[in-house]
Amino acid sequence: MLVLGRKPGEYVMIGRDIMVKVVKSNDGDLRLAIDAPKSLNIVRGEIYEHKWRLDSGGVLTPSEYPVGK
């Protein structure tokens, strides 16, 4: 896992097609803008975990979250 520090207005590129830009940051609240191909499914982590939990039929513990898989 790569961990980066970015300030508002700065961005990172993932490959040539995906840009993640910090739009706003204050008091622990972070706003990101993601520019990616429409064919790429982008969802918030809690939505992904909820769907994965429903699809797997079980309850996940934090160590079982499908992060990076």
Image (cartoon, rainbow, N blue to C red):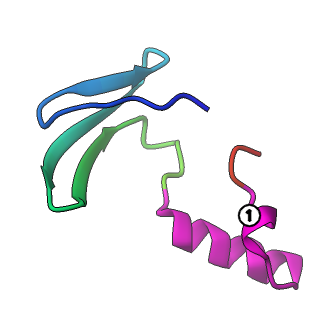
- Amino acid on which the number 1 mark rests in the picture: Tyr
68 sits left or right of 11 in the view: right
The answer to whether residue 13 is above or below residue 54 is above
- Look at the image and tell me in which quarter the C terminus lies: top right
- Dividing the picture into quadrants, the one containing residue 34 is top left
- Dividing the picture into quadrants, the one containing residue 52 is bottom right
Name the residue at the top extreme.
16
Name the residue at the front extreme.
27
The number of discs equals: 1
Secondary structure at badge 1 equals loop
The answer to whether residue 56 is above or below residue 37 is below
- Look at the image and tell me in which quarter the N terminus lies: top right
Disc 1: which residue: 65
Q: Residue at x 22, y 54 (%)?
A: 31
Q: Where is residue 41 in the image (x, y as percent from the top left)?
A: 54, 51
Q: Is residue 56 magenta?
A: yes
Q: Where is residue 44 in the image (x, y as percent from the top left)?
A: 47, 63
Name the residue at the right extreme.
57
35 sits left or right of 59 in the view: left
Q: Which residue is drawn at 13% across and 37% down?
A: 8
Disc 1 packing (10 Å; few <14; some 14–19; many ≥20): some
Q: Residue at x 26, y 48 (%)?
A: 32
Q: Position of residue 67 (x, y in %)?
A: 69, 52
Q: Position of residue 24 (x, y in %)?
A: 12, 49
16 and 27: which one is in front? Answer: 27
- Dividing the picture into quadrants, the one containing residue 28 is bottom left
Majority secondary structure of the magenta segment?
Answer: helix
22 sits left or right of 8 in the view: right
The answer to whether residue 33 is above or below residue 31 is above
Image: magenta residue range: 43-66
